[in-house]
Amino acid sequence: MALGSGGSGVVVPRNFRLLEELERGEKGIGDGTVSYGMDDSDDIYMRSWTGTIIGPLNTVHEGRIYQLKLFCDKDYPEKPPSVRFHSRINMTCVNHESGGVEPKKFGLLANWQREYTMEDILTQLKKEMAAPHNRKLVQPPEGTFF
């Protein structure tokens, strides 16, 4: 079940929603290959987050650790966060100059719904790494950054 959704039609306020996401991110997600947390615990608006994805098996990404920055503006979760890879990566949905995930090329952001979470974004990006059009793309040297 998505965070902040109880099926009752009640809209969970932004900060409560982000607190739920923070708690979930701190506990660890699934198999541990995707994680996220706040950049600055003193930021009362909970805007700046760091995500980590460990590349999926049987791809050129296998074993690589990718760091991302997610920025939740005041209109989150009504609108998606901006998502940018800090670690250099070659993927069809990532701008090769800035590392930004391009919403028009990444379905989850293009078709954003309030129920989606930062965890959903990271999990879907990991799946995208394993997609046929990304799994064998030549990658920049490991440990390089945008």
Image (cartoon, rainbow, N blue to C red):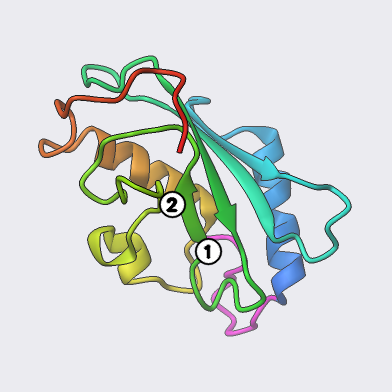
Q: Is residue 60 left or right of residue 76?
A: left
Mark 1 highlights which residue?
81
- Label 2 or label 1, whichever comes before in sequence order: 1
How many C-alpha atoms fall within 10 Å of the one at disc 2: few (<14), some, or many (≥20)?
Answer: many
Is residue 141 within the magenta segment? Answer: no
Residue that lies at the very extreme toward the front in this rendered image: 97
Q: Residue at x 84, y 48 (%)?
A: 41
Which residue is nearer to you in this view: 9 or 146? 146
Q: Amino acid at mark 2?
A: Ile
Residue that lies at the very extreme toward the left in this rendered image: 132
Answer yes or no: is residue 1 visible: no
x and y percentages locating residue 78 in the rendered image = 54, 78
Residue 93 position (above or below residue 116): above
Answer yes or no: is residue 60 visible: yes
x and y percentages locating residue 36 in the rendered image = 61, 40
Closer to viewer: mark 2 or mark 1: 1
Is residue 5 within the magenta segment? Answer: yes
Residue 74 position (above or below residue 72): below
Residue 37 position (above or below residue 6): above
x and y percentages locating residue 82 in the rendered image = 50, 61
Disc 1 secondary structure class: loop
